[in-house]
Amino acid sequence: MTSLSLVAAPGTSSLPPTDVEIPPAPQKLSGLVPFVFYVHTVETTYTASVLVSLLGIFTNAASLKAFLAMGDVFKDGVALTFFLLALTDLSVCCLSLSWGVCALGNFVEQHVNRFYRPAPPAPAGSSSVRYQLETRQLFAFPIDLSMVAVYSYVACSIFSMTTSLITTYLAVMRCLCVARPLTFRASLSPGKTALLFGAFFTFSLVVRVPTLALTDVKVIFNPRINASRPAMWSHPTRELVKDMTWSVVDIPIPLAAEVTLTICVIVMGRALKASANFRNKLASGMTSNSSDAHEKVDQSSSNPGKEETNGAISEDAAPIKLSKKEARIIQQLVFISLLFLCCNIPKLIRIVIDSAEPEFSIRGRYRYLYGIVFTIQIIFEILNSSLNFFIYYKFNSRFKESCISFCNC
């Protein structure tokens, strides 16, 4: 088998062995993905994340302005929940923009200053293909952008988890309101919604504190640029703590949210279908005639015990009758939940592969494939936080009117 050897180019300084994180030649495969393909794909995904983040900042800022213009954000629990969801989505997009810009800048700094060219022919009888690595320090940022990218991603994950919890909460409460409206409709009050949002955000923050506590910003010498600059220092136990957090929090919560939202979408879809059938029956005159209604009233008056019994089970046995407002809220939640379910698929794929293959990690054999999957996952998470505006605009007439009014100003 042909082997590859790495030699320094004449007149240039070779990199320390620990600093060479790329294969000896672009032609060599590293964990199924060629280096050149990895470079082009990651550059594209970083750029796409920046563009999608800018879209999300615009749409969520417009959503917040429209919700405030509606006037009942702090009076209605459902409206307040949608407002808080847009607020967390805006935070996700802003931090994702910071992550994308810094990650792209760090990636360019790492790879624009190093390239390969064929070395002189190998000695006669040698089967190796020789490449020489030329390093030319064209530029370097004053701080380590990878540090800013890491902190931006950790902060983004806090708001992303909060978004997941709010979306799941909205879907579950709406399902309960459909199933038992008299019991759960009053639970969507603004006060309880604000308390639950605080609890969700606090939980998302607390689970990231151990990882953040094991990092610090220090001036560290970087042999690649032959200079010292502020960079992130990590405690030796940080990776262990991060893996524990990943196993205890980052794996169960997305899986539980996926299952819960799937069930909620099915329940709300059936409620919409049942309500539509009920409305169609009313429109076509397939309801009970007045004589039947009077007969039932007479029977209930002559048998009051039966009336009480029927009243006790009416909440469960009555047909699902949704007002137009309730139907539109459920339609809105169904599409928000479906968007979340679709955008959560890349994360679930990464969870499954990561659990099955230990080498699928940032430092493992399949690090290039991991990097591609990871950046695609982030793009879908940003999309999840960027597209809710269009769902609000489609299914919320007051939101649509608010958007049109401030656009005409």
Image: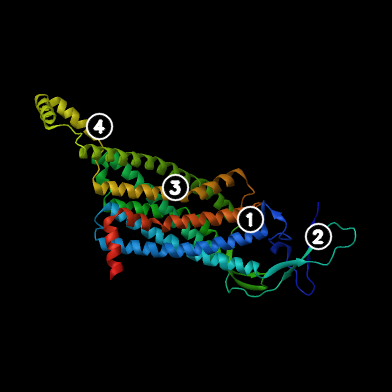
Question: Helix, strand, or loop for circle 4?
Answer: helix
Label 4 CA crowd tier, 10 Å (few <14, some 14–19, many 20+): few
How far apart are labels 1 and 4 at the CA level?
Answer: 56 Å
Proximity of marks 4 and 2: CB atoms separated by less than 8 Å: no
How far apart are labels 1 and 2 at the CA level?
Answer: 23 Å
Horizontal arrangement in the rendering, residue 280 relative to residue 108 (left or right): left
- Quick one: label 4 or label 2, which is nearer the N terminus? 2
How far apart are labels 3 and 1 at the CA level?
Answer: 26 Å
How far apart are labels 4 and 2 at the CA level?
Answer: 78 Å
Label 1 CA crowd tier, 10 Å (few <14, some 14–19, many 20+): many
Question: Helix, strand, or loop for circle 2?
Answer: strand
Image location of residue 263, percent across then percent down: 39, 40
Residue under label 3:
341
Question: Helix, strand, or loop for circle 1?
Answer: helix
Q: Residue 368, which numbered label?
A: 1
Q: Is residue 125 above or below residue 305?
A: below
Q: Is residue 368 above or below residue 341?
A: below
What's the residue at 28%, 48% (across, down)? 188
- Tag in front: 1 or 2: 2
Q: Amino acid at mark 4?
A: Ala
Q: Residue 180, which numbered label?
A: none
Horizontal arrangement in the rendering, residue 123 relative to residue 270 (left or right): right
Q: Residue 317, which numbered label?
A: 4
Image location of residue 391, percent across then percent down: 36, 54
Label 2 CA crowd tier, 10 Å (few <14, some 14–19, many 20+): some
